[in-house]
Image (cartoon, rainbow, N blue to C red):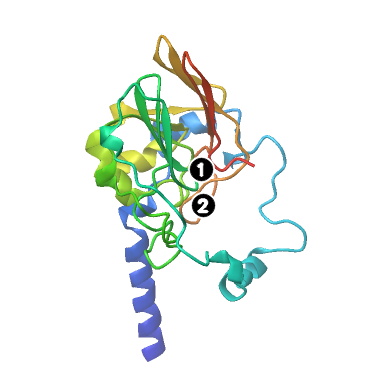
């Protein structure tokens, strides 16, 4: 009897936890119908252009989880604080062409007189919980309050180390337009971002920023998903083109 009560309590806690907004929301309605009409959506999910197994060799999910939990390499944690310099982003002249790297796939970019923010993970961890996958010392210098008003937010996909619920909800008033792959807008609307500010595109589709600049979504080799169901939203890379330069923004593409 006690075991049953404990199991029921744990199940109830688990359901409550995964109902938190940070876990996002799967595409539905018109957004789901648009996804299913994409040439990159087959057999109920988005697909890579070439065969991409989730596991290689003799590995499986059990052996991968076991290795992650029990066989952590000593080299997985830096021996010292990672060197970094914190820049006052608000003081940079808008005409300066600059890139500030926050770590992994997160960075601030100024090009063509516009400010871009890419995959901002600024809450100190890349997971649902702060005690899992925390940032290494030196990689967590920036917080949402350090970010100035952004013209364009570019989101490559919905993994926790690219799409940060806490950061985006705080940045929401300072975001002009979001450009991302098909389906990701469901997460963003669920988190209170204005639907009119969200542009979702398929691979090889472009968004004109003005007569002299454009962003094109290009194929990436990866996958997506924040909880149990994978590949319901599109992962992407970007090419940003201005009068002065072309910039490839790879996300997690292989």
The residue tagged 1 is 232
For the point 41% across and 88% down, the residue is 3
Q: Position of residue 196 (x, y in %)?
A: 29, 26
Q: Quadrant of the C terminus?
A: top right
- Say the numbered circle drawn on residue 229: 2
For the question of whether residue 143 can be seen, the reply is yes
Q: Residues within 10 Å of mark 1 (few under 14, many from 20)?
A: many
Q: Residue furthest right?
A: 57
Q: Position of residue 249 (x, y in %)?
A: 52, 33
Q: Quick check: marks 2 and 1 in contact, CB under 8 Å?
A: yes
Q: How many marks?
A: 2
For the point 41% across and 9% down, the residue is 211
For the question of whether residue 1 can be seen, the reply is no
- 152 relative position to 148: left or right: right
For the point 49% across and 40% down, the residue is 233
Q: Residues within 10 Å of mark 2 (few under 14, many from 20)?
A: few
**Closer to us: 115 or 95:** 95
**Closer to us: 63 or 20:** 63
Determine whether the residue tagged by mark 1 lies in a helix, strand or loop. loop
In the picture shown, does residue 197 fall above or below 186?
above
Disc 2 and disc 1: Cα gap in Å?
7 Å
**Closer to us: 147 or 237:** 147
Q: Residue furthest top?
A: 211
For the point 31% across and 57% down, the residue is 20
């Amino acid at each position: 009897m006690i075991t049953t009560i404990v199991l029921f309590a744990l199940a109830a806690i688990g359901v409550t936890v995964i109902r938190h907004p940070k876990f996002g929301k799967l595409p539905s309605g018109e957004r789901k119908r648009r996804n299913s009409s994409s040439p990159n959506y087959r057999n109920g999910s988005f697909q890579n252009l070439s065969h991409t197994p989730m596991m290689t060799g003799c590995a499986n999910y059990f052996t991968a989880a076991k290795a992650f939990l029990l066989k952590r390499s000593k080299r997985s944690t830096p021996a010292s604080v990672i060197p970094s310099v914190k820049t006052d982003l608000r003081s940079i002249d808008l005409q300066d062409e600059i890139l500030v790297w926050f770590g992994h796939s997160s960075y601030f970019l100024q090009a063509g007189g516009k400010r871009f923010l890419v995959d901002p993970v600024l809450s100190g961890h890349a997971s649902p919980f702060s005690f899992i996958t925390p940032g290494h010392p030196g990689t967590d210098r920036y917080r949402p309050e350090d970010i100035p008003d952004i013209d364009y937010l570019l989101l490559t996909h919905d993994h926790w180390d690219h799409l940060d619920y806490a950061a985006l909800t705080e940045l929401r008033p300072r975001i002009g337009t979001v450009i991302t792959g098909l389906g990701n807008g469901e997460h963003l609307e669920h988190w209170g971002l204005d639907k009119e500010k969200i542009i979702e595109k398929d691979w090889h589709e472009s968004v004109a920023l003005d007569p002299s600049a454009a962003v094109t979504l290009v194929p990436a080799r990866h996958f997506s998903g924040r909880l149990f169901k994978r590949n319901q939203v599109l992962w992407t890379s970007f090419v940003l083109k201005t009068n002065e330069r072309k910039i490839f923004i790879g996300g997690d593409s292989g």
